[in-house]
Image (cartoon, rainbow, N blue to C red):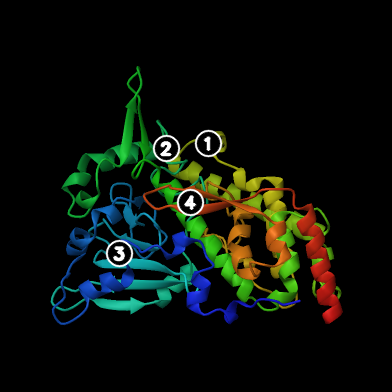
C-alpha cells in the first residue's frame, strides 16, 4: 500500500489540495505593510498614518480588548484594537492607551499556508528615524509558544474583550458600564476614530435599559474571529498531522479518530505501535474531560470577575457545543495517538486558547469534526478507496465578506472504519 508524505508535495501541488479559501488573496499582507514602513523615506511613519493607509475593508473587522495579555497595555476606556480583516490571515494589533510604553508599536501575526505556520512582527515607530521591525521577537514567542499561533479563546466566551459573552454586553454588568464610558469619547481619539461605524447595535427596552450587541459587517466580532481562526487552525492541524513523525503508520488510527469509528482506537494501530501507548484510552478520556471542564471553569471565573456578575449568568450564556461527548472522545483519541505515546507530539498546545491546557476547539460552527475534510485531501490520494468511503459534503460559510469551507461526513462511517482496520493490518504485515 502506498503512503503519502507531506513532504512529497511541492508547495504548488499542496495548494491544489487545500480548500480554495486558503489561497484567496488577502486585502493586505504583512509584506505590503512592511513595505510602507521600511526604507530611508518610508511612506508610513506613525501608527496613525498606518491606520489611515489600511483599507477600510480590512479595518471593518476588529475586536476590542480592555484586558490585554500582550505587550500592549489597555483598560476599559482605552481597549487594545485587534484588526483581523475579513479572513483573519493577518492580525494587526494596536494600543489605544497614550501612556502605554508600547503605544507606538504595531504587532502583526500572519498565517503562512505553505508552511502551516504563523509569522510574528513588531513594528516600533520612531520619532526621528525609520521604524524598527522585529520578526518573531522573543517576547511574542514567550506567550505564543515555540510553535507560535494566535491566542484567542474558543467560542463563545472571550474574557477581557468587549462582547465577552457571545458578542453581547449584558445590562447591569461592569463591562456594560465600561462600554458606555468608552462610547462617550472614542470618536475624538486619534486612533479609535479610524474604527468604521457603526460597530454595535443599541437596543433600549421600555424601562429604558440599554442593551448592546457588537458586530462587524453583520456578525459579532468575537464570533467572526473564532470561526475564521478555527478554519485556519484546521488547515494548520491537518498539515501538522501529515508532516508528523510516523504519520504513514498512524494514518488509519488518525482517520478513525476524526470520523468517530466505534471500534477501540487501539484496533486501528499497527500491532507493534500499540506498545508505544502505555496508558489505556479510558484514562486518557477521563483526563481529557477533566482538562476541558477545568479550563471552562477558568474562563467562567475570569468573566465573573470582569463582569462582576453571577456564574449562573455566564453558564446560561455559554455555548458548550465543543463539549459534546462525540467531540470530547475525538479530542481524547487524538491526544492518545499523539501526546500519549513515547515519541510524544504536543497536541495539547494546538488549540488557539491562551491556556496551555485548553482542549476546546469549538469555533461556533463545529469543533474538530470539520478537520476530516482538510485532512483527507492531503493524507490520501483522490483515487484511494477510503476517499470514496468517507463522502464529504462541503458547505460554503461567510461570517464576513470572506467565504470559508466547512465539512460534514455524509454517511455512516461503518464501511470506512472497516477499510481503516484493513489498512492498519496491512501496515502491520508490511512492518
SS type, badge 1? helix
Q: As rendered, which of 77 and 279 lies closer to the eye? A: 279
Disc 4 and disc 1 in contact, CB within 8 angstroms: no
Q: Position of residue 428 (x, y in %)?
A: 84, 76
Which of the two discs, 3 and 2, labels the residue nearer the N terminus?
Answer: 3
Q: Earlier in the sequence, mark 3 or mark 4?
A: 3
Horizontal relation, residue 150 to residue 127: left or right: right
Q: Which mark is residue 317?
A: 1
* Residue under pointer 3: 28
User: Image check: 33 left or right of 158?
Assistant: left
Q: Residue at label 2? A: 168
Tag 1 and tag 2, C-beta contact below 8 Å: yes
Q: Quadrant of residue 124?
A: bottom left
Q: Residues within 10 Å of mark 1 (few under 14, many from 20)?
A: few
Q: Position of residue 146 (x, y in %)?
A: 52, 75
Label 3 and label 2: CA atoms lie apart by 29 Å
Q: Which residue is the site of mark 4?
A: 227
Amino acid at each position: 500500500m502506498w503512503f503519502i508524505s507531506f513532504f512529497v508535495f511541492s508547495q504548488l501541488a499542496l495548494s491544489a489540495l487545500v480548500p480554495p479559501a486558503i489561497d484567496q488573496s488577502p486585502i493586505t499582507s504583512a509584506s505590503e505593510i512592511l513595505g510602507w514602513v521600511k526604507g530611508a523615506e518610508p511612506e508610513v511613519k506613525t501608527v496613525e498614518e498606518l491606520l489611515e493607509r489600511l483599507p477600510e475593508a480590512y479595518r471593518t473587522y476588529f475586536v476590542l480588548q480592555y484586558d490585554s495579555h500582550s505587550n500592549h497595555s489597555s483598560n476599559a476606556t482605552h481597549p487594545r484594537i485587534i484588526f483581523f480583516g475579513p479572513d483573519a490571515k493577518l492580525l494587526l494589533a494596536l494600543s489605544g492607551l497614550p501612556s502605554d510604553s508600547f503605544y507606538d508599536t504595531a504587532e502583526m501575526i500572519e498565517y503562512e499556508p505553505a508552511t502551516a505556520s504563523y509569522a510574528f512582527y513588531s513594528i516600533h515607530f520612531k520619532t526621528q528615524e525609520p521604524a524598527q521591525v522585529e520578526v518573531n521577537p522573543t517576547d511574542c514567542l514567550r506567550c505564543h509558544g515555540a510553535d507560535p499561533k494566535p491566542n484567542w479563546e474558543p467560542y463563545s466566551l472571550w474574557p477581557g474583550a468587549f462582547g465577552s459573552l457571545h458578542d453581547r454586553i449584558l445590562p447591569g454588568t461592569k463591562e456594560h458600564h465600561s462600554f458606555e464610558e468608552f462610547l462617550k469619547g472614542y470618536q475624538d481619539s486619534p486612533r479609535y476614530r479610524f474604527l468604521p461605524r457603526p460597530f454595535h447595535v443599541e437596543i433600549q427596552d421600555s424601562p429604558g435599559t440599554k442593551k448592546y450587541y457588537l458586530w462587524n459587517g453583520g456578525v459579532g466580532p468575537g464570533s467572526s474571529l473564532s470561526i475564521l481562526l478555527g478554519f485556519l487552525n484546521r488547515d494548520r492541524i491537518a498539515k501538522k498531522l501529515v508532516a508528523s513523525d510516523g504519520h504513514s503508520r498512524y494514518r488509519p488510527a488518525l482517520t478513525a479518530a476524526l470520523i468517530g469509528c466505534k471500534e477501540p482506537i487501539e484496533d486501528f494501530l499497527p500491532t507493534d505501535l500499540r506498545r508505544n501507548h502505555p496508558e489505556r484510552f479510558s484514562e486518557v478520556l477521563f483526563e481529557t474531560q477533566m482538562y476541558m471542564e477545568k479550563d471552562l471553569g477558568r474562563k467562567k471565573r475570569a468573566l465573573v470577575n470582569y463582569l462582576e456578575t453571577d456564574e449562573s449568568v455566564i453558564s446560561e450564556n455559554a455555548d458548550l457545543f465543543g463539549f459534546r461527548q462525540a467531540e470530547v472522545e475525538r479530542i481524547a483519541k487524538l491526544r492518545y495517538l499523539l501526546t500519549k505515546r513515547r515519541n510524544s507530539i504536543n497536541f495539547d498546545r494546538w488549540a488557539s486558547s491562551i491556556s496551555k491546557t485548553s482542549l476546546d476547539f469549538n469555533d461556533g460552527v463545529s469543533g474538530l469534526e470539520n478537520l476530516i475534510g482538510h485532512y483527507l485531501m492531503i493524507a490520501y490520494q483522490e483515487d484511494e478507496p477510503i476517499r470514496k468511503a468517507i463522502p464529504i459534503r462541503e458547505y460554503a460559510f461567510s461570517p464576513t465578506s470572506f467565504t470559508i469551507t466547512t465539512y460534514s461526513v455524509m454517511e455512516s462511517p461503518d464501511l470506512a472504519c472497516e477499510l481503516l482496520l484493513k489498512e492498519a493490518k496491512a501496515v502491520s504485515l508490511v512492518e
